[in-house]
Image (cartoon, rainbow, N blue to C red):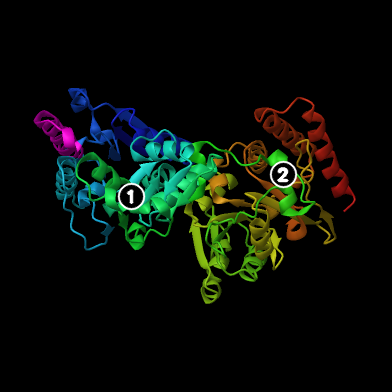
Amino acid sequence: MKRILVTGKNSYIGTAFIRYAETYYPGEFRTDTVSMRDGAWRELDFSVYDTIFHVAGLAHADIGHATEEMRRNYYAVNTELTLEAAGKAKAAGVRQFVFMSSMIVYGGQEHVTEDTVPRPLNFYGDSKWKADSGVRELADDRFRVAVLRPPMIYGKGSRGNYPVLAKMAKKLPVFPKVNNRRSMLYIENLCEFLCRIMLEGRGGIFFPQNAETVSTSELVKEIAECSGHRIRVTPLLTPAIALGKHMPGKIGDLCRKAFGSCWYEPKMSVAEGAGWDYRVADLRESIRRTEGVAPKSARQCLKQEGGPEAAGYGGRRVSAGDSEPLVSITTVTRNSSKTLARTIESVLNQTYSNMEYLIIDGCSGDSTVEIAESYREKFAARGIIYTIVSEADRGMYDAINKGIRLSHGAIIGNINSDDWYEPEAVEKAVHFMEKTGCDYMYADLRMVKADGTSFLKQAKLQKPATSRGWNHPTQFARRELHLRYPYKLESLHDDFDFFLKVRKSDARIAILNETLANFTMEGISHERKLRAALARGKCRYRIYRNNGYSRWYLLECILIEGAKFVLHFNS
């Protein structure tokens, strides 16, 4: 577990990071905060921390009306306090110092590349630049310094320019069409980036930003649409903006700030050599979350009949602008040498090609890892990213969570090491998700008994919550759902807990009545002993109750376990 000290109590970024880390990286971080407003922080023992995350600082300066005292205060807080905190951290033996610099160090240059030299235009930018360059001078092999120079950060509760634009987007009937280009960074994308570099203890200069750049007009239109407000973006007002940019005083500053270009070269924002992506939400999804606007609930999308238009899906793509989104498939293993090859080959032989495959092994004592390694060249030949991790974990769902964190895909599926996919499973799932615009789907499942006979378990989404029509090996979910609801590591049925949480969320669910996977009825979830059946029933009942369902669901738990006994004795 990494111990993190956030310097800057109640800061927007610091608070968001702590909340995000607790939600999506449970057990990975222990975070404390300290106020930098008085000198009490100087007495704090920094040596117990792995990382100091320095977010304390002054921002949003009114440059045109700044007094000399205000200027001195910016340098005192943004520069001197930062350097003092970094020096204290290094002296205490802290391994990593993470500093939130800003894109403002480039002085509003329109297009920032790797060769662009920082040239601050005002005291605010200069105060950040002096801290930025100063903390990096302290870096060495034992003290890694990570400097982030983000563009405009936005999210629910953010301050600065975004709330002003959002207010206009929700009230104005028209807005000027201007083809500028801006980099932005959604707060959860930033938090995911921070979690990753802290886990790895990275140092260097980083430029995190959203996957998409956007014009001010596009941004305002997107906010308006997500908020249900009609706004017309028109080029008729564009000449007025062009004229306004050349005017002196506040009007000129406002036009240049709102409608000027300021963007990073996209390749700068990839964490070199990391092998992971931090963009957990695209532009549309991030604005939807920021504005607190939910799509149709799962309960409004129960049936496939009538087609996607009848269900109101609107044909939204799984991954905006990507006709073949990356799909991550995970398989967790431990001593699975007898069955793993069949599982791996079912992924290798998929008709869909834009995939990555992650095998997360729990320190197997047999030839499991060797079998997995033997397929490297075959996956490479197909251009499929292939990752094998073998290390101790806290059980199956801890391993699945780990695989999800290591993955990059917009869509995530999981196939266990004794189950296998049908050849067109991934392709059918992706096309179905694109067609319906759903966030979560599952399909029919072939149940294979010990004697080799099988029967079909049809996928359904009954109005009363139940697992009778739900088939975990066939599920595919948008990445955001897994990040929002990581498996809890409480029981054998954590996957069912995930399903119930998705049902109660604002996610759109759709059912595909085609067979996508095969399930072996020999695992622990089908153990025939009465004691095991009672434990499973009790566990399932507890999950129902924890998710707000009534005591009557005890009857459903008894019926499920009874059905398993009947199936086994007839096999």
Work out whether 265 lies above or below 60.
Answer: below
Residue under the point 79% across and 52% down: 306
Q: Position of residue 285 (x, y in %)?
A: 52, 47
Taking depth in this image into account, of 303 and 230 the one nearest to the observer is 230
Horizontally, residue 81 falls left or right of residue 348, namely left
Residue 202's disc number: none
Q: Amino acid at mark 1?
A: Ala
- Residue farthest to the right, as pictured: 570
Residue 146 visible? The answer is: no
Residue 297 visible? The answer is: yes
- Residue farthest to the left, as pictured: 68
Horizontally, residue 255 falls left or right of residue 379, namely left
How would you classify the magenta stretch by its main secondary structure?
helix
**Range drawn in magenta:** 63-89
Residue under the point 32% across and 48% down: 151
Taking depth in this image into account, of 163 and 177 the one nearest to the observer is 177
Please tell me how crowded label 1 is: few (under 14), some (14-19), or many (20+) other residues with Cα within 10 Å.
few
Q: Earlier in the sequence, mark 1 or mark 2?
A: 1
Q: Position of residue 557 (x, y in %)?
A: 78, 34
Residue under the point 67% across and 59% down: 429
Say what secondary structure mark 2 lies in: loop
- The image quadrant that residue 79 belongs to is top left
Magenta segment: does it hold 66? yes
- Tag 1 residue: 240
Magenta segment: does it hold 73? yes
Horizontally, residue 319 falls left or right of residue 275, namely right
Say what secondary structure mark 1 lies in: helix
Q: Which of label 1 and label 2 is nearer to you?
A: 1
- Tag 2 residue: 301
Tell me how many marks there are: 2
Work out whether 126 lies above or below 115.
Answer: above
